[in-house]
Every structure is written in C-alpha cells, then in structure tokens.
Image: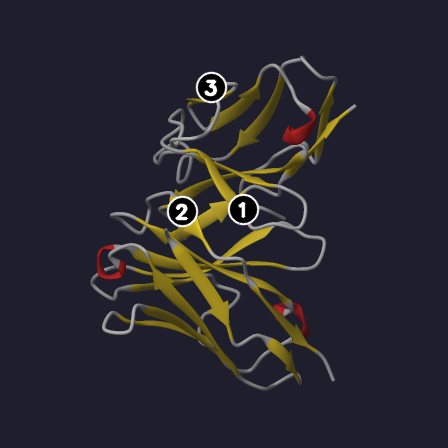
Amino acid sequence: QSVLTQPPSASGTPGQRVTISCSGSSSNIGTNTVNWYQQLPGTAPKLLIFSNNQRPSGVPDRFSGSKSGTSASLAISGLQSEDEADYYCAAWDDSLNGRVFGGGTKLTVL
Amino acid sequence: EVQLLESGGGLVQPGGSLRLSCAASGFTFSTYAMTWVRQAPGKGLEWVSTINTGSNTYYADSVKGRFTISRDNSKNTLYLQMDSLRAEDTAVYYCAASKPYSKSPLGYWGQGTLVTVSS
C-alpha cells in the first residue's frame, strides 16, 4: 500500500488530454512539493515535473502539473503514442522522514 | 554528460549480504544528495535510502537496521551495503541524485542493477 494514492491505469486517444491524480496527506503533499516521474517501458525513471508545476529542460509543455492542498495532478495534452509509460508522483514525508512514491499509473494510448 | 552507473547486483541467498556501488560522473558529486530507489519485478518505485551532502542518512522502515548507505566523495561513488537480505528485497536498485537537499527532486538516475534474493 503506497503512501500516495494514484489510479492504477489511465488511457486516451492521440490528441486527447488526460489527467492523473495523486492523493496524499498533510505530512507529505500538504507540506512539501510534488514531483512526477515518467518511466518508459524497460527504462529507468526520468524526472518529468518538479516543484509541483515546473518542467526540466527538454520536457515538452504538453506536460503540466498542479497541486491543491493534499492532492496533485499531472496533465498531458495532445497525447502521443510515445507518452505510453508509467507515471509516478512523489514527495518528501515529514512524518516518515523519507521520500514517498505513489503506486504508479500506467498510461495507455489507444 | 551526467552518468550514474550501478554495479554489484546479483543472486544471493536469504540472509546473505551484497554491496551495491554507484559511480557518478559529469557533475560535482559532493554537492548532491544521493538516493537509492528500488523496483520489485512488475511493481512500483520504492524509496530505500538517502544520504545528503553532510552524510546524514535516512532509511525506509523496511530496510532500517539491515541496509547502510554511504558515499566516498573522493571516488565519486555511492554505496549500499545490504545485510540480512530477504526475498522481498528482490528488485532493480536505482541510484539517483538530487540537489541541493535530500527533499529535492531526483534529477539524475542510473540504469539500475538487479538484486535477486533466492535459495
């Protein structure tokens, strides 16, 4: 059971907009910033969004993040086949004094 | 170019030990907090341990007392000493770097090394 809660799956057709939610608590998302990681099949995770809504250089602006209270979300607009991957939210948890991840959401592009 | 290269994985019996290494290059290693994250087969990411630039260490409850994280800034290398290994420790172990704090996002990742705990 992950500390952060994500839906196990999401899907969309090319060009659509999809969102992935991430629910936490006051000790993690409520207090610290949220990061999102993308893991393409058979590869290592890659930082996709940091500090709730910032994109590292090289990440397309089709990807955006937001946070409100103890929840966060990742939005992907103009969905492309290469976006098919697992997506993980993460944050520091002050009560556990460690990093926590969501269980991951498998995105399928239909 | 930033590179993180893990090594030391393999097959070990339950109760055994293994030491993982992560060789870093392409960035100023001593100024980054370093983290181990693992992923069991077919499962999600799980944080294992973090060591900051001042060598303060943090552990997940699942490995506390069994795993030890350390770093050698002179060799640009991160380590994870794993003792009393259990079947549930079977996973791909990734090292990752964050700056400037332990809480900072994991901006750089290695490709991972597989640890299999089985008799």
The answer to whether B66 appears left or right of B71 in the picture is right
The residue at the point 53 percent across, 65 percent down is B62
Q: From the viewer's side, name the closer residue of A57 and B49.
A: A57
Q: Quadrant of the C terminus of chain B?
A: bottom right
The residue at the point 55 percent across, 31 percent down is A22
Q: Contact, CB < 8 Å: mark 1 with mark 2? A: yes
The residue at the point 61 percent across, 85 percent down is B15
Q: Which mark is residue B106?
A: 2
Are the residues under marks 3 and 2 on the same chain?
A: no
- Badge 1 sits on which subunit? A
For marks 3 and 2, give the CA distance: 20 Å
Tell me the SS state at disc 1. loop
Tell me the SS state at disc 2. strand
- Badge 3 sits on which subunit? A
Mark 2 neighbour class, 10 Å CA radius: few under 14, some 14 to 19, many 20 or more: many
Are the residues under marks 3 and 1 on the same chain?
A: yes
Tell me the SS state at disc 3. loop
For marks 1 and 2, give the CA distance: 9 Å
In this rendering, the answer to whether B41 lies above or below B73 is: above
Mark 1 neighbour class, 10 Å CA radius: few under 14, some 14 to 19, many 20 or more: many
Q: What residue did someone put label 3 on?
A: A61
Q: Position of residue B83 (x, y in %)?
A: 51, 82
- Badge 2 sits on which subunit? B
Q: Which mark is residue A18?
A: none
The answer to whether one can see residue A63 in this image is yes
Residue flagged by tag 3: what amino acid is it? Asp
Q: Which mark is residue A45?
A: 1
In this rendering, the answer to whether B100 lies above or below B20 is: above
Indicate which disc, 3 or 1, sits on the residue closer to the N terminus.
Answer: 1
Residue flagged by tag 1: what amino acid is it? Pro
In this rendering, the answer to whether B46 lies above or below A13 is: below
